[in-house]
Image: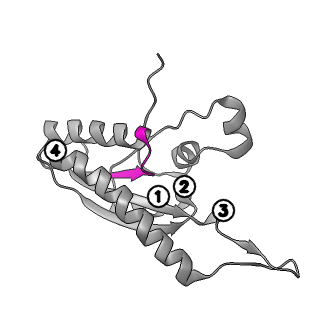
């Protein structure tokens, strides 16, 4: 069975659903260690200078990431605490798919769990989904918790 789970979260309802499922797995096996990871997506965090140069202020980004990460991780951790479970939390910056896969490898993760935003085929084709990239890049199993279709 799985001993180390990496739960990737962006704070969305889909990610919280994935957190609830992770809790379910942890109750089945109390030996499971879970790390919740929030990745601040740098791909949209830049400015264009008057000369066309692309730049960003790392201090401003770090402050913004810390602010957002604190809230997202607190909300996700609350799901675990409500079930009487504990998890570790981490925050990082970068392209989410690559950071998730790298972190999973560094930690010796047995399973990556993440929610699916369900963008639909066309938007996913244009933008590419994080879950799809993680699925193809990861060396361990990836579980994507999909949205309910009502």
Residues marked 2 and 1 touching at CB (< 8 Å): yes
Q: Give whichever of 24, 74 is nearer the camera.
A: 74
Residues marked 1 and 3 touching at CB (< 8 Å): no
**Where residue 1 is drawn, which disc sits there?**
none
Residues marked 3 and 2 touching at CB (< 8 Å): no
Specify whether residue 147 is painted magenta.
no
Question: Which residue is labeled 3 in the image?
Answer: 44
Question: Which residue is labeled 1 in the image?
Answer: 100
Please name which of the two marks, 1 or 3, marks the residue nearer to the observer: 3
Placement of the N terminus among the 4 image quadrants: top left
Please name which of the two marks, 4 or 2, marks the residue nearer to the observer: 4
Could you give the CA–CA distance between mark 3 and mark 2, rounded to whole angstroms? 14 Å
Q: Residue furthest top?
A: 150
Please name which of the two marks, 4 or 1, marks the residue nearer to the observer: 4
Q: Is residue 38 above or below residue 16?
A: below
Give the residue displayed 44% in from the left and 63% down from the top.
68
Could you give the CA–CA distance between mark 4 and mark 2, rounded to whole angstroms? 28 Å
Estimate the x, y position of residue 131 in percent, counting from the top left. 53, 44
Q: Which residues are magenta?
A: 5-13
Q: Residues within 10 Å of mark 2 (few under 14, many from 20)?
A: many
Q: Residues within 10 Å of mark 3 (few under 14, many from 20)?
A: few
**Where residue 97 is drawn, which disc sits there?**
2
């Amino acid at each position: 069975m799985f001993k180390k789970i990496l739960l990737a979260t962006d704070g969305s309802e889909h990610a919280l659903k994935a957190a609830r499922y992770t809790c379910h797995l942890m109750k089945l096996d109390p030996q499971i260690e879970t790390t919740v990871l929030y990745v601040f997506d740098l791909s949209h965090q830049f400015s264009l200078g008057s000369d066309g140069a692309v730049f960003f202020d790392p201090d401003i980004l770090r402050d913004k990431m810390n602010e957002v990460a604190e809230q997202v991780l607190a909300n996700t951790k609350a799901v675990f605490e409500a079930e009487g479970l504990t998890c570790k939390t981490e925050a990082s910056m970068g392209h989410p798919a690559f950071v998730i896969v790298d972190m999973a490898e560094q930690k010796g993760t047995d399973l990556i769990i993440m929610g699916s935003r369900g963008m639909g085929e066309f938007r996913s084709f244009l933008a590419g989904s994080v879950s799809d990239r993680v699925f193809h890049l990861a060396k361990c199993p990836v579980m994507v918790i999909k949205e309910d279709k009502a």
